[in-house]
Structure formats: structure tokens, C-alpha cells
Amino acid sequence: MLCGLAQYGNLIGITIGYTITASISMVAVKRSNCFHKNGHNVKCSTSNTPFMIIFACIQIVLSQIPNFHNLSWLSILAAVMSFSYASIGVGLSIAKVAGGGVHARTALTGVTVGVDVTGSDKVWRTFQAVGDIAFAYAYSTDTLKASPPSENKAMKRASLVGVSTTTFFYMLCGCVGYAAFGNNAPGNFLTGFGFYEPFWLIDFANVCIAVHLVGAYQVFCQPIFQFVESQSAKRWPDNKFITGEYKMNVPCGGDFGISLFRLVWRTSYVVVTAVVAMIFPFFNDFLGLIGAASFWPLTVYFPIEMHIAQKKMKKFSFTWTWLKILSWACFLVSLVAAAGSVQGLIQSLKDFKPFQAPE
């Protein structure tokens, strides 16, 4: 039950995070054009709220599509978008490093105490970074189901290639991005305006991020939708509002099933996640908090306990002891990451005005 709650909480957090990230990318397109037209010293402040509303409206429509998770083209589109914006980010960073000029100030230990941050700020940032790493490491969001041996082997190979490719690109983004910007590296160098030109390429990269997240949002919220709807149908099987479905003919689309419960429930979910995103539109802090909350129960505790049970390990044996030590050490890592992310959210909220553009 603990792992189930953590998993669904993780999925909810991811959909909120995707709403934040997609709106930031949409805003970046508008700001990029503003900077190109008026110069790099202009503020070009733009509120995320209208773009979150646009994103939510798109998701309300898409959430009503039955069997959305079976659309194979969605995975292909996501892969193309990811490859595109990651490649653009790496390419722009390499160009910045190769271009010479003023070199970014880098250090093995990151930002410098007394120059960039205070000692306490660096500690909190380190804790938050641990949460970001935990979020990236959490493979527990994998939605593969058990399958026949032949298909299972193929899916394992596909997962290995996919995870390896993703790791390579994002590690490259992190390393080359730090080489380009040093201790002043923005949280997202495609939306934090580490680059200004060519503005059209930056616009394209941010559009790729937004398009990717439009589909990714649905992939991660489908398990939530299916769980609530299946449990409701079991609990109230005779309730026509929950189980009833009506056919509607859509021009050029054929018959389309409409469920009143699905319409109300899924719309409410999208609206709530959008409102939460509007209240806490802080990308890095929120990402770290999701990672901290899901890392230990889903990526460490549950797999270790399953392994111990399957192997029927004796208590206090060498392997059992070290696995338990690993589990508790990772639990402490999650606590540290959560503390750093909460502190970051508190600091960000001090000067934040909801539903207004930053000054």
C-alpha cells in the first residue's frame, strides 16, 4: 500500500511538473522573440499562467480519448522531440564553448561559497540537487507489463537502449552545459536564456519540449485515470453516471464514446493539477521534491524487499545486512533531498506573486 500510494503520488507530481515545464517552454518562445526584437537587456516579463491554462485546455480534450495509451505514434513523437531539443541544447553549448570569448567560471565543487552563495545556501542547494538526481534515477515510472518470454526479452533490450541513450544525452547536456555556463548555469539552459541566438532555433527547441510534454502528460496520468475509474465501477456497478457510456458521431472520426463520469473526473483532475502548478511554478524545487518523495519507496525499498523475499534470504546474513544498510542509507538521502526541496520552495514563495508575471 505504501508503494502504491508513492507510485500514484509520483505520477500526480509528474503531471504537475509537466504542466510547469511546458508553460515555461511556451513562455520562453515568447520571450526569445521579445529579446530578439528589443535587445537582450529588456525584461520581457511574461506570466506562465495563461500558458498553463492553454496547456490544461489541451489536456482536457486529450484526456477524453479512450485508450490513449495505446497510440503507438505517441512514443515515436516523444522520442523525436527529445532527441531534437537535447541535440540543440548540446550543440548550442558546444558552440558557446568553442566560440571563445569570456570563459565560464567553473570549479570541481561547483558554486563558490562567499562569491556565488553563502555556506548555508550551498548546503540547501546540494540537498536539492540530490533530489533532482533521485528524480532522474527513478525508473519506477516504467509502465511495461509482464509479457511472454520472447516479448519480454525484446522489451528489456528496448528499455536498455532507451535508458542508455537518454542517459548519454542528458549527461552530455549537464557536462557540456556546465562547461558553457559554469557556476552561472541556469536550471534549464533552453528556457533560462543561457542562449539568445539564433532565436529561431531556441524557439524550435522549446516547441519540441512543449509538444513532447503534451503527450507525456497523458502517458503518466492514464494509470491514475484507469485506477479511479475501475475502482469506481467496482464499487458502484449500477450507477449509470459512472458506468454509462454514450456514442457520439464525430465528423471524420467515426463513433466516439462519451462517459459523463470520465468527462467530469478527468476534467477535474487536469484543472486541479493546473491550479497547483500555478501556485507552485518552480521547476527545480518541484522536480527535487518529486524525486525525494518517490526515490526511496519505489526505486530502493520495494525492489530490495522483493529481492529478499524471492531469494528467501536469512536475516542478518551478509547480503541481507548490506541490502538493509543500502535501503536505510537511501532513505536518509530521500529525507535530505526533501528538506532541500522544501527549503527551496519556501524561499521561492517569499517573493512570488501567484498569477502574475515575475518582475
Image (cartoon, grey):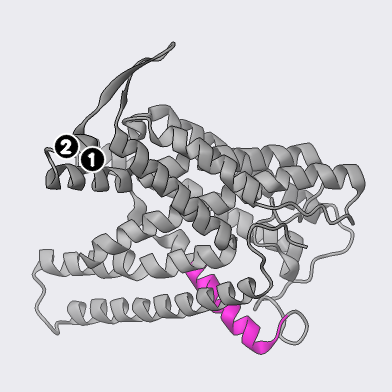
Q: Which residue is mark 1?
A: 152
Quadrant position of the C terminus in the picture = bottom right
110 left or right, relative to 342: right
- Mark 1 residue element: helix
SS at mark 2 in the image: loop
Question: Image quarter for residue 108?
Answer: bottom right
Query: Hey, what amino acid is under mark 2?
Result: Pro
Residue 298, given in percent of the width and then of the height, sits at 30, 64
The reply to whether residue 161 is visible in this rendering is no
Residue that label 2 marks: 148
Decide whether the magenta segment is chiefly helix, strand or loop: helix
In the rendered view, does 238 fall on the left or right side of 143? left
Q: Amino acid at mark 1?
A: Asn
Region in magenta = 117-132
Q: Give the percent coordinates (x, y) of residue 357.
A: 72, 57
The N terminus, quarter of image: bottom left
Quote the CA–CA distance across marks 1 and 2: 6 Å
Up the image or down, 303 lies above or below 12; here it is below
Residue closest to the eye, 271 or 211: 271
User: What residue is rendered at 59% in x and 60% in y?
Assistant: 281
Residue 20 horizontal/vertical position (percent): 56, 53
